[in-house]
Amino acid sequence: MVKRILSHHSINTAAHETIEVERRHSFEKTLLTNNRANSAPMISNDALLEGEDDHHNSKKKHSITIVNVSATELTIKKPDEEQPEAREQWSEQLDFLLSIIGFAVDLANIWRFPYLCYKNGGGAFLIPYVLSVLLGGMPLFYLELLLGQYYRQGAITCWRKICPLLAGIGWAVTVIAFYTDFYYNVVISWGLYYLFASFRKILPWSDCNHSWTTPDCSTVNTRRRFLENCINQLNNTLNTTIDLSRINPNEQNSFETSLLYENCSESLKHSRIVSPAQEYFHLQVYRLNKTRNLSLENLGNINWENVACLAIIYLICYFSMWKGVKTSGKVVWFTALFPYVVLTILMIRGLFLNGSMKGIEYYIRPDLSKLNDASVWVDAASQTFFSLGPGFGVLMAFASYNDFHHNVFRDAMITVAVNSITSFASGFVIFMFLGYMSEVSGRAIKDVAEQGSTLVFIVYPEAIATMPWAPVWAVFFFLMLLTLGLDSSFGGSEAIITALSDEFPVLRRHREWFVGILFFFYFLIGIPSCTDAGVYFVELLQNYAAFYSIIIAVFFEAIAVSWLYGIQRISEDVQEMLGTKPGKFWIGTWCFAAPAFLGGIIIFGLARYTNPAYGEPTDPFYYKYPDWSHLLGWMFALSSVIFIPAVAIYQLLIEKGSLATRFRLAITPWKERQRNQNPDIIISTNHALLFIIFIHLISSSINAEICQTDDCRSGDCELLRLSNGLIKKSCHCAKNVCGETCQRLCNATSPCDTNPCWFGGTCVDVANFDYICLCPSNHSGKNCRTVVSCQPNTCYNGGTCVETAYAARCTCSADFSGAYCQYKKNKLQSKSTDTLPHVEYKQFDAETLAVIANLGSASNGNTQRMNPPDSSVPLAPEAHSQFVFCLTNPCDNGGTCFVTNTATTKGICVCRDGYFGDYCERSFRNMTIASQIPSGYCSSSPCLNDGTCVEVGGFQGYCRCSGEYRGLYCEISVRAVSCNPTPW
């Protein structure tokens, strides 16, 4: 793996105070010992850089000094910089844990998972569900907690710092959280309405003796008698003698009994018979009287009882959150734990109900044939995603208030486990009561099983109404729903509050006012949902506002973190916080499984999409939405995700430079911009190389401003971003080397002082501190390094000289290597590793990265040099050889060997600081005025047919061919090659 090569930028403030450099590794406790500091090249730059404060949008200018150091990640603290205000933290670690458990365990665990489990194969459904949790839900849940804790910011600011190009993700998830929190609080207000109604001796939905009931209202006993009469009539019609008591709707073992029940059940569905629980919700909580022709165009009057319940919900939210997580963290001790008390009580009560065991059997009975249905897997994936809730910005917000080194991994695993166990356990409670309802009503469990609001506001209340002490059980049940809903509402609201407060710090300083205004605005826009037909609006928003948009947003999150921010960066962040890097499982799921998981949900969701309606066509309160409402719904969905491309375009427009430069800057994380790292050369993983190569191709086509190695003859080129946004090139010269382009020795009076001509060539001064070499026979090029034709002593150690169209080359025997077979292979050398070692010398530009992208293997140089017969004549090493380059370990002095293309066996040596040459055989430390310093690989103009020479570090290079030419020196015409042309 290619690791980042970082440079430390020392910031000289206006007062010229000394900076403090601290190591961020080992939890910022171990000071860095830099063995290369004494020999690192240094150059002062007068460029001005923009700095961005952690909590403010102010721009600060600093002059900089750049020092090359080893690739240890450093942070820079500026003593004169104003310290940001301290961030609020959780009072106790359990406050955080209970808050994320309360957010993850919500109404969906009660009203959706049990039904999906029953519908999709019972116990067999646990197989796709557990796999979805492990490969999709859990990695995304953990990832969001990591990002929030590391950056300690809300979603908007956090994503701006992770990847400015995709900062729109933060805005998108904040808008989605706003929509979701809006309709979710309306649903909670229904639970509060039912809670108040439960404080009566007789529950209002238990009978039909009320002003809102209609002649079609019928109790459970009435519906049971309807079925019995229907079956008796069919008995008489068919002249059968089936005993009515033998007909069990859940166990129809004969064709006759099955036929009787199914016919009568269908008759009941299509009749005008309505349960009192249905009428209570639709005609009392709402006023959906069919004679009034209510619709989205005609919402009717405001129901002030609903308005009051909604206002109480927002008052509870306000006084739980107005002081921040220190107050909400205490409230969740009740709201997160109380539901488990109620579930336990209801489970114990359910065990003693008639039919409860039959309900449990239907719930967990495995049907493995269902696993062949793709929709089962999609249901499992979507339930996992929406139950754990990554992508709403809630997890980031909660984790941002943690201590930096808090063990968030432990909390993530606990929460995922608790959420899954709660979902499965709640199914037992639900289906115990459904089995009881089946027994009481005489209907099959499949006919009473529902999901969503119908289950918790119609089916379950009706079952409770038939029990002894019904009001007591109703109070427990709806209080549980209220606490479950409030926990999730707290999370959604905190996501919005934290995101906006961190992006606009003035809001944080006036949190009480900001939270009050936010909830008051929520309340005002929620009033239409409290009208007679407001449920239509709530259901429409629930169908469109979050489902597709949140999955799309989280899909881009996974791509941004894994493929733009980079696995290496996130791994280093995790190590900095928790002391250890994430394992291969997490890397694999973040990079591949999670995006595939989300992409599958999107594709199958769109494939199965149908225009939603309120209820089923056979329901007495069925409502088909008008066509324009579906367009409105998709506008809601797009109004959030549109921020992702919109902000990306805006980010590219505000950056300076060419398109490629803007893109590179836009994908550079904030923390590396703060350190003034060159966005051309910062890479964290092989994944990021793909994007760098892509941008390099764009750069080549539009002549963008990028560093080329030949910009600096004996040093590194770096792009500096000035305060006006422009990009300036700067050369960082090697030791004892000076000049704007590092073109001369510091004490040299002539370019010929360095003896640049090889093989006895004569140096002649020309204008502008340049030179030419008068080469001896059989040598050519700028520095006489190219052997033109084969001579008797061209190759050593039995090597065979081969003349090409451009120059002579040597093919070596198995035991020797080098351009002229001058190296003996070390028989004791260990096998080369597939893992790339750390590169310590050069900061590569985009051209170099394009080469390294095709790395095949690498090894550290460790060879035994065999002197040639005439050791007084300096050799002319070559960048590439005719064998698998790195397997010969040709690099001296600790240089690192890279195979640049396994197909063509090309390779290069990247030297440690202080060494140069094609094989790192020469040292700057030992150079004198008389020493021979080559001016670069491209100085000899090796590329033919208008090819462009590119140097890649270590005085090595390659030819970028144009048109129809390929080959090492662009000497091969593809017109003459039938297959497998070389990529260069």
Image (cartoon, helix red, strand yellow):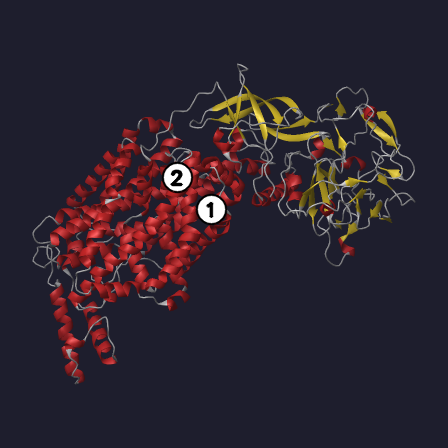
Q: Which residue is mark 1?
A: 558
Residue in the image at 28% along x and 30% along y? 323
Instruction: For the N terminus, give its image quadrant.
Output: top right
Distance (Cα) linking label 1 and label 2:
14 Å
Instruction: Measuring from the top left, give residue 818's x and y in whole percent.
Output: 79, 43
**Mark 1 or 2 closer to N-term?**
2
- Crowding near the residue tagged with mark 2, few <14, some 14–19, many ≥20 C-alpha atoms within 10 Å: many
Residue flagged by tag 1: what amino acid is it? Ala
Residue in the image at 67% along x and 25% along y? 39
Checking the image for residue 396, the label placed there is: 2
Checking the image for residue 883, the label placed there is: none
Q: Is residue 293 among what the camera can see?
A: no
Which SS class for mark 2? helix
Q: Is residue 792 among what the camera can see?
A: yes
Q: Residue furthest front?
A: 828
Residue flagged by tag 2: what amino acid is it? Met
Instruction: Measuring from the top left, give residue 373's x and y in whole percent.
Output: 40, 65
Q: Residue furthest top?
A: 15
Please determine whether, in this image, residue 602 is positioned above or below residue 662. below
Please determine whether, in this image, residue 140 is positioned above or below residue 5. below
Residue nearest the viewer, comparing 186 with 458: 458
Q: Is residue 518 left or right of residue 893?
A: left
